[in-house]
Image (cartoon, rainbow, N blue to C red):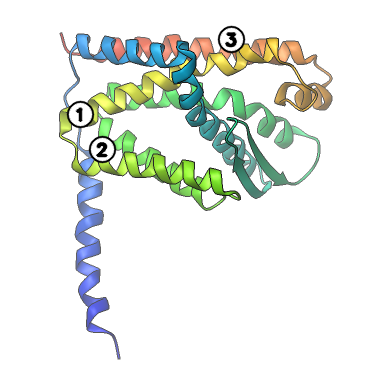
Amino acid sequence: MTDGGELGLVPVLGEVLGEIWHRATTTQPAPSTTVVLLTAGVAVLVVLVPRLWGVARHAVTLVHEAAHAGVAVLTGRRLSGIRLHSDTSGLTVSVGRPRGPGMIATAAAGYLGPGLLGLGAAWLVSRGYAVGLLWLLLVVLVLVLVQIRNWFGLWSVLVTGVVLVAVTWWAAPVWQSVAAYAITWFLLVAAPRPALELFAHRSSGSDAALLARLTHVPAAVWIAVFVLVTIVTAVLGGSLLVSASAP
């Protein structure tokens, strides 16, 4: 026999999923140019002020490791887990061929991830899908969550997820748009900083050093590529956000 309670949950779940889909696929009006520029200013402030950056960098690390993990899976590698540490470092372990295009792409994805995600986010919100972006980020967080292998990483992802759920489910539409723009600006302007920091703090365990061993291209060249790509994504993404804003 089928439990009546379970049957009762089916339509409720369907309604919730339907509401989520409706919100995610419904466009929202673009905020004013003033709001767009203010959210950009807040993002720049967070990146430049050391105390704020010390906290916000955890979000960049989360995206960095998620990019490693995503590309590893897409290139046929087996993901073993993700760790996020309190010192803002992280580690993604995947199993597969130790060399070759898949390993190179996986190693390169980390520093490129935040900027490319920011560019994709800018494209979405510039077309009015601010809430859709927030739900998409929640899906990414859930995928990361199941691969987390340490307590600090679990705490970081859960806290981030709770904040996103609160904004997507209870915040007014205007504040959802503001949050989407702020997150997008942050991804865009924050992406170059970790890449620039590699010039000052190179190590044999960095992604650039690993790529140098895999490709025989100097680590400095890889760092320059990271910096260049993240700057380009910031400029392109920023132009999308500003051009889409209301007068």
The crowd level at tag 3 (other Cα within 10 Å; few <14, some 14-19, many 20+) is some
Disc 3 to disc 2, C-alpha distance: 33 Å
Disc 1 to disc 3, C-alpha distance: 32 Å
Name the front one of labels 3 and 2. 2
Is 243 on the left-hand or right-hand side of 246? right
Return the residue nearer the eye: 60 or 188. 60
- The kind of residue on which mark 3 rests is Leu
Quarter assignment of residue 199:
top right
Is 99 on the left-hand or right-hand side of 162? right
Q: What residue is drawn where x is 39% and y is 38%? A: 137
Name the front one of labels 1 and 3. 1
Sequence-first disc among 1 and 2:
2
Q: Which residue is mark 1?
A: 175
- The kind of residue on which mark 2 rests is Val
The image quadrant where one finds the C terminus is: top left
Is 26 on the left-hand or right-hand side of 209? left
Q: Which residue is mark 2?
A: 167
Q: What residue is drawn where x is 60% and y is 11%? A: 227
Percent position of residue 155, x then y: 48, 45
Q: What residue is drawn where x is 79% and y is 43%? A: 97
In contact (CB < 8 Å): disc 1 and disc 2: yes
Quarter assignment of residue 138:
top left
Secondary structure at badge 3 equals helix
Q: Which residue is mark 3?
A: 228
Q: What residue is drawn where x is 36% and y is 25%? A: 183
Return the residue nearer the eye: 46 or 192. 46
Percent position of residue 123, x then y: 36, 23
The crowd level at tag 2 (other Cα within 10 Å; few <14, some 14-19, many 20+) is many
The crowd level at tag 1 (other Cα within 10 Å; few <14, some 14-19, many 20+) is some
Sequence-first disc among 1 and 3:
1
Sequence-first disc among 3 and 2:
2
- The kind of residue on which mark 1 rests is Trp
